[in-house]
Image (spheres, rainbow, N blue to C red):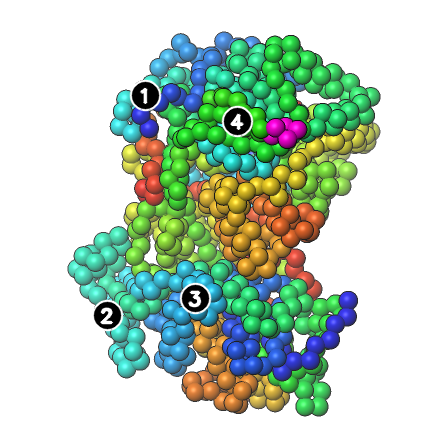
Amino acid sequence: MSEDRLPLLRRITRKEHAAIAFTLDGAPCEGRAGDTLLSAILSRSDSLRRTEFSGEPRAGFCQMGACQDCWVMTETGERLRACTTPLQPGMRIVTMTGKAA
Amino acid sequence: MSTRPQPLVVGAGPAGIRAAEALVAGGLRPLVVDEAPACGGQIYRQRLVPDGRSTRDLYGSEVGKADRLHAAFAAFEGKIDYWPQALLWNLRDGVADIVVAGATRRVSYDGLVLATGATDRVLPVPGWTLPGVFTLGGSQVALKAQGCAIGSRVVFAGSGPLLYLVAWQYMKAGVEVAAVLDAAPASAKLHLIKALPLDPGIVLRGTRFVAELRLRGVAIRTGIEGLRFEGEGRVSGVAWREGGRERRLACDGVGYGLALRSETQLADLAGCAFRFDERDRAWLPLRDAAGRSSVAGVYLAGDGAGIAGADAAERAGERVALALLEDRGLAFDKARAAGLEAELARIARLRDALEAAFPFPAHWAAAIDDATTLCRCEEVTAGTVREAASRFDIGEINRLKAVSRVGMGRCQGRMCAAASAEVLAAATGKPIEAAGRLRAQAPVKPIPLALQLAAEPAKLPEAAE
Amino acid sequence: MSRHLDVDVAVVGGGLVGSSAALALRNMGFGVALLDKGFCGAQASGVNYGGVRRQGRPLEQLPLSQRAHAIWPRLKGLIGIDGEFLRSGHLKLARSEDDMVSLEAYAATVADQGLDLELIGHNGLRERFPWVDGSILGASLCAGDGHANPRLVSAAFASAARRAGAHVLENTAVTGIARNGESFALEAGEGVSLKARFIINSAGAWADRFAADFGEPVPLTRIYPSMIVTEPVAPVMTVNIGMEGGGIYARQVERGNCVVGGERALPLDDPDFSRPRGDGVLAIMNRTAEVFPALRHAQAIRFWSGTEAAMPDRNPVIGFSDTTPGLIHAFGFTGAGFQIAPGVGEVLAELVRDGRTSTPIEAFSISRFSRPTSPADLDRTRYGSGAGPHPEPQPRGAST
Ligand SMILES: Cc1cc2nc3c(=O)[nH]c(=O)nc-3n(C[C@H](O)[C@H](O)[C@H](O)COP(=O)(O)OP(=O)(O)OC[C@H]3O[C@@H](n4cnc5c(N)ncnc54)[C@H](O)[C@@H]3O)c2cc1C
Ligand code: FES
């Protein structure tokens, strides 16, 4: 994913809420207080992960912890379900690419 | 003081909250667990932080119910044990395995109320896995709980009351709604006449949504066929057929869903018997009018036991709590129980009418083309499923799973089981119930291999009786 | 619905043993009926771990195991699919000096059986299998062993038997078998009756009932191995892993999922059905994270278990009945039947055709249990509801 692609989500509220710094695939990013990880990532990007088999991009689907299509990883390998994980300052997120373990 | 363990309530939506409230009133101290960080369930989901919107902005006409429910919870929260952000991943022999705060705990319970709610039901269409395509519920969560729109020019497609509601909510929030594409023919809405005497409020509200959408110039198309979502790497448009004509619209976000499906995994793990429900086109756990399942001490309430909506969920939650009290030999209000059952029966009739007005387009299943992904986790296509069914001569969904991997992925078939059963039934020419029911398997959601048992076994206070 | 069939052989039980026997018999031209109380391959054969290994088997099983070994690479021609069979090698780990001594002793015992075992010390292990935790002292590698997908293999054997002309009757429980002159009369399902010259009792964990009916009680117990599978992850495990002295066994499939077995599940109220225990799967998960540090953060996405027949001496019962001509038993594989089943099928077909087989099976004779048995030997799970169709098969399984 690159910054020149338009994000998927558009903020309507909380535009002026406190910024929360995190990194996305190594690049510094900002979310807003009250964000889930999914909202934080998709407010500046257009996918969350690539599938293991076809490599298609995915960006979640249900946003309520059911479809399991929004798992991302931290740089140290922990899995986070983006739609149900509140954004925390300093999170270092990598979007799953292929079969990266 | 009795030494019986406390009851366990799974889910803090309308059903779970009212169940817990009535258990507290009856003298028990239940443990309430829910995956969400705050109570309310899907419909009355709360924001992580205040965002300048009022609860009226958030819940619209349902604001009174939402505020009352949240207030009720706050009032009894000190009298229950409440574990938010807790995942119940396995149930067996009266013991629940629950991950909370990074560790797992084994909890014995006496009396189990399952109020696990529902998620969107979908049938795959080409492009449904593209980034920017969300469920109707997901689109609503983004707006309601996160204050984010799923795009700048959005299309809503599918069926069910949520279709018009979410479109209207987006419009109200100032987002351009390019179209509402309804799978049902316009004539289906005539069934709403039957719903009118049962709940005029609901019908009039729905009618108002449609009228206001039209007034603002939103295209509303009905009886659509051949729906597909298009785009390279993300959604950039929708296409469909209407009266034999191909149509196409550009958009940058899609909300899609075909009403709801019950979360029944835990009822299955608890050993509950199931039956096929014609209205929901789904296998649902058996329950009596009070909400008792086929397993002693296991109670079912809310959408997790069959789709009936939030008002029914509140009543069903309270009703099962009364049943639990009764079964435990405690005092309960018989007249209240009877009154709740009567209201639930009325709502059930309302649901029949709504289902007829927003019918599930089952015939879409046969038309799903072979290249379309059916199981989004395992990336199994409809063609693979059909091929496996015929190669192995299979007409049953668990066998189909075994040989095709459909439903074997992280979501455990939540997103594809209903669709796979439809595709299988269409392929074999048998009725949908003949395809059977995908059995639940623990863990109901993924858990990490290194998950540790909590050092301190959860010391749970005993119920005062 | 009443239906009558007259066949040469009625195979009772459509697991991999029964299905492969049915296919082999059809290929010899016999008239065959294959009956299952549920779906063919939905029990232990279809839900087991999927290990295809010879290493670790008792010496007396190795000739049969070698026979099966020759069949696995030929599956595509035999049943139309390769069953995801991978000749990856099977690596058995030693956690202690004692374990290593046992591995060495085993290698010496089976030295002339053609397994080509290779003993690997700690340094060799670090070099060649760096993804195995450093606490493991050594290992024994059987390069010719591997793993396969049981869900596909067992279903495909039954389908192949059907395509070859066997009558495959699913959801048709055999409720009674009687010797009737020169043949057998079977009652099954709702109104199905069969006449058969031979019976193959391949009813898995339910086979003891049919043996007992013919005066041959066996000390069969039921075991319920627990399985977990992870989400797909990057390639980690290059071989099928076992552990000396038990513990876990693990393999990674080509799609990336890791399947790990160990521990025992518990039967449900109906002992035909079982499901893993929460603490049991947790133990497997934690041990997997310890032995394969690269999987530390991987997620478990599904657990299952199955119902398998175990014999006290860990050897199966294969061969003619001692009491009843025409009756052939094949059950009790004690958690290790997946690999040898295709070989057993061929052997059973030979027994029908020739009355004997070229593969030594004397050690598996049912007569070994006909000595007076102590009550403790017979202390086993009561019969489940063996009769009655199961429209919804439960995950059941066995390990190898
Ligand atoms: C996305 C969505 C949007 C909807 N929007 C509307 C709407 O706008 N208007 C309307 O009238 N109706 C709406 N409905 C229907 C309405 O939400 C339901 O009828 C009502 O909420 C049912 O109440 P419930 O208590 O049964 O379930 P829910 O409110 O869904 O509560 C169930 C709770 O159980 C928890 N849970 C489930 N399994 C576990 C587990 N294993 N461990 C821990 N916790 C668990 C869940 O996290 C959830 O919080 C919507 C439904 C959905 C799914
Ligand atoms: S978007 Fe479905 S689980 Fe997160």
* Cα separation between marks 2 and 1: 55 Å
* Cα separation between marks 1 and 3: 49 Å
**Element type where label 4 sits in the image:** strand
Q: Main secondary structure of the magenta part?
A: strand
Percent position of residue B193, x then y: 80, 23
Q: Residues within 10 Å of mark 2 (few under 14, many from 20)?
A: some
Label 2, on which residue? C118
**Element type where label 3 sits in the image:** helix
Give B381 or B285, whichever is nearer the viewer: B381
The magenta stretch is B241-245
Q: Are marks 2 and 4 on the same chain?
A: no
Residue contact at pointers 2 and 4, CB within 8 angstroms? no
Which residue lies at the image location 65% right of the left edge and 68% below the top edge?
A: C169
Q: Residues within 10 Å of mark 3 (few under 14, many from 20)?
A: few
Residue B208 circle label = none
The mark nearer the N terminus, 3 or 2, is 3
* Quadrant in the picture for the C terminus of chain B: top right
On whether residue A96 falls in the magenta region, the answer is: no
* Cα separation between marks 4 and 3: 43 Å
Q: Amino acid at mark 3?
A: Lys
Left or right: C118, with C240 as reference point: left
Label 3, on which residue? C76
Which residue lies at the image location 68% right of the left edge and 90% below the top edge?
A: C182
**Mark 4, mark 3: which one is toward the viewer?**
4
Return the chain for callout 4: B
Quarter of the figure with residue C88? bottom left
Left or right: C240, with C280 as reference point: left
Label 4, on which residue? B238
Q: Is residue B253 above or below residue C154?
A: above
Q: Is residue C396 above or below residue B109?
A: below
